[in-house]
Amino acid sequence: MRELDRQSPPEVPVCAVVGAGRLGTVLAAALSTGPALKRGEPLPEAAEVVLLAVPDDAIARVAATIPAGPLLGHCSGATGLDVFGDREGFSLHPLMSVPHGSTPDVLQGAGGAYDGTTERARATAQRLAERLGIAATRVKAEDRVAYHAAGAIAANFLVALEAAAERLAATAGISREQLAPLVLATVEQWARLGPERALTGPIARGDEGTIARHRATVAERTPELLPLWTELAALTRELA
């Protein structure tokens, strides 16, 4: 049987990536003709797009130093397009954490957001997203902060919550490695089934005796976590 032809990645304009951090390094490897540039380094003459992978509070300042000609883009989740002033530009934010040492395939299958000041800018952002393997949705300026805050809850708060669970588990001699399979399975079930069907445990079952014992043990062993436990128990009751 003849092997099916694989679809070629979309053609994208010549990109220069400014910002040699974790995300900038990954973007440069996937999109650029050269390595990620540090701020202030000269741009390649052939660059048609300059993609800024710099901290949010530096975007406007760095954008102002880019000479006229290339289309500007930034990779911030919460920042709008007003940082470009009157210049044409776009944003493209991958909804994915990028650890140190990541390769471009870390972005394959990620969600994300884009926007642009013109039709051309938005089309460019979409093409770059497709090349990176990002399933990006247009998120307008008034929705950017809500989008980014949701991502922070889903990723950053999850890590903080698991650190809290790890702290309590350690008082019983249980390690992070032993908790991890439960966490990974639960996240997979949430993604596949949705929160209501994925929820298990004593609150979902209405086991009030166990819930009371949980609260008392948290208060005794990790009292600093009791306010967090109380808020999350209330949120879990609403979901259940």
Image: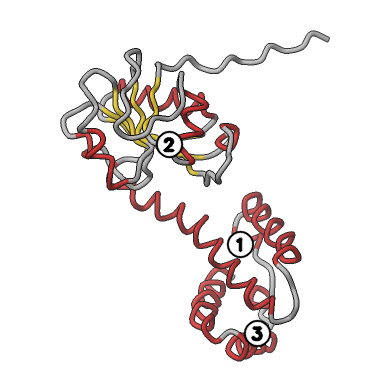
Q: Residues within 10 Å of mark 1 (few under 14, many from 20)?
A: few
Q: Residue 133 — which label? A: none
Q: Position of residue 43 (x, y in %)?
A: 32, 22
Q: Position of residue 74 (x, y in %)?
A: 34, 35
Q: Position of residue 53 (x, y in %)?
A: 38, 37
- Nearest to the eye among marks 1 and 3: give it: 3
Q: Quadrant of residue 19?
A: top left
Asked if residue 221 lies left or right of residue 61, the reply is right
Instruction: Work out whether residue 173 or residue 111 is closer to the camera in this orientation and state it.
Output: 173
Instruction: Work out whether residue 76 or residue 23 is closer to the camera in this orientation and state it.
Output: 23
Instruction: Work out whether residue 67 or residue 10 is closer to the camera in this orientation and state it.
Output: 67
Name the kind of residue labelled 1 in the image: Glu
Q: Residue 196 — which label? A: 1
| Above or below for 54 versus 205 | above
- Nearest to the eye among marks 3 and 2: give it: 2
Question: Which residue, given by chain and number where applicable, does mark 3 sit on?
Answer: 214
Color scheme of the displayed model: secondary structure
* SS under mark 2: loop
Ranked by sequence position, the earlier of labels 1 and 3 is 1
Name the kind of residue labelled 3 in the image: His
Question: Which residue, given by chain and number where applicable, does mark 2 sit on?
Answer: 20
Separation of residues labelled 1 and 2 (CA atoms): 41 Å
Q: Residues within 10 Å of mark 3 (few under 14, many from 20)?
A: some
| Above or below for 189 versus 63 | below
Ranked by sequence position, the earlier of labels 1 and 2 is 2
Q: Position of residue 6 (x, y in %)?
A: 66, 15
